[in-house]
């Protein structure tokens, strides 16, 4: 036992009585204990040891084929009142859910070991961090939690002996039965119960379940924010670093932006980009009244396919040691891994993610699952920020929202003020697929990129954003919107993306510093053409004009869709957002 905290000890005992494991092992986080567990997992084939010369400390894991992604339809917010879960979440009465799940958890760990994992979300010793304890029967979970969180004995340093402020996570892979798979959150009890899955997003309970769903609820009650945001720092040639936080829906390039490599033009002048986080930010108002952010995680749970030495060399480098690969292809030629988009040279002698023999040169099937992942320690990342472990976090100069929009949204615009920024965040949308020639994808509204992750009523969540703005007053970060995915008449992307996005970030920072003017439009401030530095870029003036243009008719259509979307929230929709919609309509009419 690693703690004297009575609340922890009593709860662990209750869960032991329920799940009836043969053994209970407390995870202290020591090398010896972890090495022992890895050895067991290799023996049972839960992990495959990879070539330790090429990929030291790296392992491969395969999940069942029915268990490869987050399951939104099996994810529940079990608040006592249905209204508190809101229209965007699946709701179930907590008593009903506990009673259903107790039957599934009863005796589920017979002949198994229960691992007790204490972990901290956020740096040890930080007032912005929080403690969780996850009970699991999966060694894969233990090893992954060791990468994704500050795990083991150290985590209890952040929990006072009599404190009840820890998140109680219970997970069992049970039989990986998709019919009885549940990811249930009880925000009012600081509790998460997850059963019948062994896939990362459903079982690494510190990540989406705690750091977003439970933490967003805690943040509303305690006056801070848990957001689906990357955090990056831009260092200028004088050595000053300014930080931005950006929220994009899943699969819109958060990890790539977080680890951006500046174009030569900026590199030569001495600009650098530092990664603080690639997925989640916890934000609090600091003593100076500004907004500060920490990344509560300690690693990256990144999508493997498409990651390569051009698209994201920093992410690729992060996976070279002490990394767990899940559902990628196993290259038997040198006992390493391969995935689509890694390089042009797929192995001929390999095992695909389903465990079948696979020839990358001749097979029509994919070697890696499209949602295959790497779990890599943040400290492996060549551009990890020096402030990564700063207990006070980093001050945020700008908040950026974005999505994938082929036509409507310009490359970048600045909102008029915090309230307008909240409106823009609340109406964030993304198209489901990249636009094919002439066609536009289906738009899904994903407010602040939190649609699958907000642990309470989204109407109340919007209100919380507005309240935070009132507290921040003139110290509030400026709010921007970006769209890297605008296409031309032929469906070709107008903006090169990747490292070139630095040019947009520079405009954003220049606006924050009051160093550039902008053009006022109906939707916000957009850059004057000459203020976006396109030196040595592939973008010509003609295309720039297109990406910065606003089609008033499309925007009028957009306001209709927003109106429809807002209806969902009924009386929970803050009046301020209704007003913002009306203001936008008026401005569009006047233009
Ligand atoms: C993720 C997601 O895995 O957003 O980060 O789905
Ligand atoms: Mn994410």
Image (tube, rainbow, N blue to C red):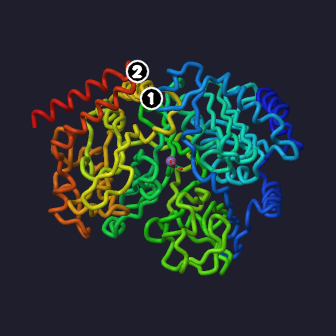
Residue at (55% x, 39% y) in the render = 73
Residue 540 image label: none
Q: Is residue 102 left or right of residue 298?
A: right
User: Circle 1 sits on which residue?
Assistant: 458
Q: Is residue 471 visible?
A: no
Q: Is mark 1 within 8 Å of ligand 1?
A: no
- Say which quarter of the image contains residue 147: bottom right
Q: Is residue 228 visible?
A: yes
Q: Give SS at disc 2.
A: helix
Q: Is residue 272 left or right of residue 111?
A: left
Question: Marks 1 and 2: in contact by CB < 8 Å?
Answer: yes
Instruction: Work out whether 539 lies above or below 109.
Output: below
User: Circle 2 sits on which residue?
Assistant: 572
Query: x, y percentage for residue 164?
Result: 70, 26
Quadrant occupied by the C terminus: top left
Q: Is residue 142 left or right of residue 89?
A: right
Q: Is residue 465 left or right of residue 12?
A: left
Query: x, y percentage for residue 277?
Result: 51, 50
Instruction: Work out whether 132 lies above or below 346.
Output: above
Instruction: Work out whether 472 lies above or below 148.
Output: above
Query: x, y percentage for residue 478?
Result: 32, 39
Q: Nearer the viewer, residue 437 or 458?
A: 437
């Amino acid at each position: 036992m690693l703690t004297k905290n009575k609340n922890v000890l009593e709860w662990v005992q209750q869960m032991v009585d329920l799940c009836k494991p043969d053994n209970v092992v407390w995870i202290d986080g020591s090398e010896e204990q972890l090495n022992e567990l890895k050895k067991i997992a290799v023996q049972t084939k839960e992990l495959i040891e990879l070539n330790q010369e090429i990929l030291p400390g790296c392992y491969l894991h395969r999940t069942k084929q029915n268990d490869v992604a987050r399951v939104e339809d099996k994810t529940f917010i079990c608040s006592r009142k249905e209204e508190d879960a809101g229209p965007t979440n699946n709701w179930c009465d907590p008593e009903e859910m506990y009673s259903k799940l107790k039957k599934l958890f009863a005796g589920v760990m017979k002949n198994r070991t229960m691992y007790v994992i204490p972990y901290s979300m956020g740096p040890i010793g930080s007032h912005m961090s929080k403690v969780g304890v996850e009970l699991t029967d999966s060694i894969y979970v233990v090893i992954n939690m060791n990468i994704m969180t500050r795990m083991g004995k150290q985590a209890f340093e952040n929990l006072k002996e009599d404190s009840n402020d820890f998140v109680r996570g219970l997970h069992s892979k049970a039989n990986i039965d998709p019919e009885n798979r549940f990811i249930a959150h009880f925000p009012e009890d600081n509790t998460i119960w997850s059963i019948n899955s062994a896939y990362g997003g459903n079982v690494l309970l510190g990540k989406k379940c705690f750091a977003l769903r439970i933490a967003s609820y805690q943040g509303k009650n305690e006056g801070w924010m848990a957001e689906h945001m990357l955090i990056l720092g831009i260092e200028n040639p004088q050595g000053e670093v300014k930080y931005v936080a950006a929220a994009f829906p899943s699969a819109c390039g958060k990890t790539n932006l977080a680890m951006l490599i500046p174009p030569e033009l900026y590199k030569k002048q001495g600009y650098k980009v530092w990664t603080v986080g690639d997925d989640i930010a916890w934000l609090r108002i600091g003593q100076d009244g500004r907004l500060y952010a920490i990344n509560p995680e300690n690693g990256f749970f990144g999508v493997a396919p498409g990651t390569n030495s051009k698209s994201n060399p920093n992410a690729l480098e992060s996976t070279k040691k002490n990394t767990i690969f899940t559902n990628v292809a196993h290259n038997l030629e040198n006992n390493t891994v391969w995935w689509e988009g890694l390089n042009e040279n797929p192995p001929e002698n390999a095992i695909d993610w389903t465990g079948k023999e696979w020839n990358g040169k001749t097979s029509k099937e994919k070697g890696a699952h499209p949602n295959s992942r790497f779990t890599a320690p943040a400290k492996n990342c060549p551009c990890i920020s020096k402030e990564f472990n700063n207990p006070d976090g980093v001050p945020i100069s700008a908040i950026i929202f974005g999505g994938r929009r082929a036509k409507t949204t310009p490359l970048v615009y600045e909102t008029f003020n915090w309230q307008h920024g909240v409106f823009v965040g609340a109406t964030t949308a993304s198209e489901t697929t990249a636009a094919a020639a002439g066609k536009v994808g289906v738009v899904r509204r994903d407010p602040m990129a939190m649609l699958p992750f907000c642990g309470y009523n989204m109407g109340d969540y919007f209100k919380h954003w507005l309240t935070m703005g009132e507290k921040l007053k003139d110290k509030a970060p400026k709010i921007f919107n970006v769209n890297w995915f605008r296409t031309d008449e032929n469906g070709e992307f107008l903006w090169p993306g990747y490292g070139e996005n630095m040019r947009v970030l520079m405009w954003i920072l220049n606006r924050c510093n009051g160093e550039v003017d902008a053009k006022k439009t109906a939707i916000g401030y957009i850059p004057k053409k000459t203020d976006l530095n396109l030196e040595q870029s592939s973008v010509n003036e003609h295309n720039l004009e297109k990406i910065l243009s606003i089609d008033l008719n499309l925007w009028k259509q957009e306001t209709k869709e927003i109106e429809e979307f807002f209806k969902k929230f009924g009386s929970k929709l803050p009046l301020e957002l209704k007003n913002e919609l009306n203001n936008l309509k008026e401005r569009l009419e006047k233009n």
